[in-house]
Amino acid sequence: MATTALPGRGYLEDDTPTVWSWVKAWLLTVDHKRIAILYLLSINFFFLLGGLAATVVRIELVTPQGDLLSSDLYNRAFTLHGIIMVFFFLIPVIPAVLGNFLVPLMIGARDLAFPRLNLLSWYLYMAGGIFALSAAVFGGVDTGWTFYTPFSSTYANSNVILTIAGAFIMGFSSIATGLNFIVTIHTMRAPGMTWFRLPLFIWASYATSLIIVLATPVVGITLLLLAIERLWGVGIFDPALGGDPVLFQHLFWFYSHPAVYIMILPGFGVISELIATFSRRRIFGYEFIAFSSMAIALLGFLVWGHHMFVSSQSVYAGLVFSFITMLVAIPSAIKVFNWTATLYKGSISYRTPMLYALGFIGLFVIGGLTGIFLGVVAIDIHVTDTYFVVAHFHYVMVGGTIMAYLGGLHFWWPKMTGRMYNEVWGGISALVIFVGFNMTFFPQFVLGYLGMPRRYHVYPQEFQVLHVLSSSGATVLAIGFIVPIIYLMFSLWKGKPAGNNPWEATGLEWQVSSPPPTHNFTRIPVVTSEAYAFPPEAAERDAASWRPGSPL
Amino acid sequence: MATTTQTTSAHHGDHGHAAHGPELQHHFETPAQQKEAATLGMWAFLVTEVMLFGGIFLAYAVYRWAFPDVWAEAAHHLNTPLGTVNTVVLLVSSLTVALAVNAAEHGRRTRLLQLLGVTLVLGVAFLGIKAFEYSEKFAHCAGYKTPIAWATGGELLGEQECLVPGRAFAFPAEHGAATEEHASTNKTPHQLFYLLYFIATGLHAVHMLIGLTIVSILTFLAWRGFFTPTYFTPVEIGGLYWHLIDVVWVFLFPLFYLVH
Amino acid sequence: MATSKHDTPGDAHGHQEPAHYDGHAHGHISVATYYRVFGALMLLMFLTVGAWWLEGVVAIPRLLGVIVALTIASTKTLLIVLFFMHIKVSSRMSQLYAAASLVGLLMLFIVIMGDYFARGWPPQLGPLP
Ligand code: HEM
Ligand SMILES: [Cu+2]
């Protein structure tokens, strides 16, 4: 039988005669790359919505009085912000957009193992999103994204059920993605693609998927139990029956602490790719980075009680949780050290993705270290439910996950679209985001330490300076997020054609055309070298092609 | 073996591979790879199912630990004989499913159909018995002795008893206890037991319904002669799902029906 | 030609699947075994109901009753998983995932029940010193 490799056509091209068939070709696609694009559009839409809610919150906080929103509306605004950002943006964003696009390409497969399940996951995501948004339309929710009982059960006066239905459905969407990644990475690697030749993004995605599969069902059943309590009027978290509301917190955080690693681990994976590529070096301590992802995935399951230090959890449990929280910082630190060691004597080029990567390292270090503060019971009791916690998790979630996402998006944008974005604007907006971010959230550490509680719409006069600083930082940050939308869209028709490998990166995804053909590889590649085998002359070539003013 | 790669076709059905059966999807290289993917995928999915039920079992453990006496009292009002029958029904169905996979593997279509058919009957029987147990509880709330009496307006229940959680919940006082305690027994941990009972068995019943749907589809496909000794993966992974439902029941049964 | 990879991180000399299809690459469970397993399951079921009945007649510590019931249920599960669900002859990865659900449950139970134990449960017991 002869090999008849038909010429590959870019996955973005269609030969659909009518608009309707074009719509169908997109909405019923099973191509992982197209699904990634569907996710890209919808997730970014949710990001903008969540940003809108945040804008409202920040505007309200400019003055100490509640002049824009009532306390009730304010509660609904920050809850909407939290729910959209956590469940519909941060958790799915990197796996569903970058992961969907890249996992098969990076391991040399034609698609994910279950393409139709993959499409289903997008529909579930949309369904969950519609539920959550409809709750907002019908008056909103005021429980905070954590849905603590009995706020959300006995004393709830808002659309708790619609919202948790949204989060519940969304959970199945991430389970579908995680399951697909696990199976794909196990069974569909190209010949020669051994575990230790996998790009680190794959390791990170695998660890993330493991967390998704083990933790998400628990929050699913927890939300279900909560919905039953709300619907039925009696429930198992109801103290009137002898039930324990703190059990809800246990079950919730059993998922939601691992969920913060669902957010950050794929980000770690992206950063490893960026750092290696733009330093032109084999990543330092590949195995350590790979295994630290797995260690985080496992240890991450044993620390959730650090969210419950003041919840009436036992002091002994608090001690143990505090200790394991310290332990889990070790693998995180290993990654940071290995990245910096990779930079050392690397041939560094400050392209936009690299700016994001460097920004990530700085911000994640601050976020992680303040996490350690919070992991110390004594400090945590002082700053529980203050802006210190808010600043901590924004440093890791925005400074970590979003920076990684944007860095990865810029890095793989040429691959996804076939076009280069404008490097100057890219660099500028990366810097604007970095500055705006720090302006927004650094003051919040101070605020929190001075005693400003979270989730209040009025505050004492003395905090106003810091709040105004934070709100003006948020304005800068918002500009930084909007500018990329403009120049990335613009690049679609004015951008330079990217070529197969604009960054001269290693990795199988760079060996196919940009945008990749529908089935990725006309011939399944055979892998013979490790992941970051940059030829020694790569750095020299970089240096030779440097011109004054060029972003290298 | 050479590979024909059709990079233009987005469909699974119409590809020109001649070296293997039509069931090999385009993105897999070999049938063995496809089968391993399906099996591993199912197992990973079963992990999520275990964790899903795990949450309920955890709540059960927490409350049984707190209220052992309540648990013993409350469990006595469940219908243990029917629960036992249901356990037998499910265990037999697990056997028939295991045998069905075996029959599919050996290409014995009639036997496969028979075994799947028996499984369907057993599954429906299980749900029927479960439904009877539920309706018994609801009939008691309505004041009748049995579901049939409830439907026909027959014999009334002597004492006040309602084991369905909710506002009407009333746990009958133990014999010899003061009768005026009736009202105050409403908000007690007994409700927790029955909440967990209804939630756990209800969720299990939902899984049974899904399982029955899967087995029906498998039966239909087997009837159409879809499975061959080289391709019966759907039967196998469908069977895995069925067995998991069985495993869940294996725990639910002693935890709810066999409590002292 | 391309062969698929099934090896786990640890097993470098992993069993390479033959490229051609082999209906049961990992071994086989016979019908006779299924019947024997089923017999054992039935036996265990009567044991657990019998133990429950016995507890109603003679005074046995409650904890012991729970342990017996759970041991029997776990044994039944083990039998079903090993034989009916073919884990005994499955690929190493499926075996690992089957075990993963146990690990997940253990994490959930040990940590949360540990907290209840230390916090004092039921509440009127009060916390540990
Ligand atoms: C270096 C590792 C980290 C440590 C030691 C750590 C520690 C902590 C601690 C102790 C708290 C509880 C504070 C309190 O409520 O009083 C906390 C809260 C939080 N952390 Fe982290 N954290 C780490 C990394 C992360 C990462 C990577 C993320 C997300 C990407 C994250 C997201 C959050 C969130 C969302 C909360 C607040 C939840 C809420 O109450 O709404 N953390 N962290
Ligand atoms: Cu945490």
Image (tube, coloured by chain):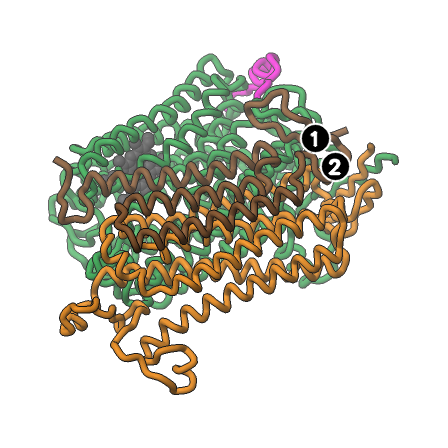
Chain colours: A green, B orange, C brown
Q: Residue at x 28, y 65 (%)?
A: A234
Subunit of mark 1? Answer: C
Image coordinates for residue A144, horizontal then vertical, percent: 28, 53
The CA span between labels 1 and 2 is 9 Å
- Residue B85: image tag: none
Image coordinates for residue B131, horizontal then vertical, percent: 46, 69
On the image, which quarter does residue A369 sit in?
A: top left
Image coordinates for residue A255, horizontal then vertical, percent: 37, 44
Q: Which residue is mark 1?
A: C17
Which segment did they paint magenta? A531-549
Task: Say whether mark 2 and mark 1 are on the same chain.
Answer: yes
Q: Residue at x 59, y 18 (%)?
A: A534
Residue A324 relative to residue B182: left or right: right
Q: Is residue A495 visible?
A: no
Q: Residues within 10 Å of mark 2 (few under 14, many from 20)?
A: few
Q: Determine contact: label 1, label 2, CB under 8 Å.
A: yes
Q: Amino acid at mark 1?
A: Glu
Residue B118 relative to residue B193: left or right: right
Q: Is mark 1 within 8 Å of ligand 1?
A: no
Residue at the far front: name it. C58
Q: Quadrant of the N terminus of chain C?
A: top right
Subunit of mark 2? Answer: C
Up/down of C113 relative to A541, above or below: below
- Residue C22: image tag: 2
Q: Residue at x 31, y 60 (%)?
A: B75
Q: Amino acid at mark 2?
A: Asp
Residue at the far right: name it. A1
Q: Looking at the image, is mark 1 or mark 2 nearer the viewer?
A: 2
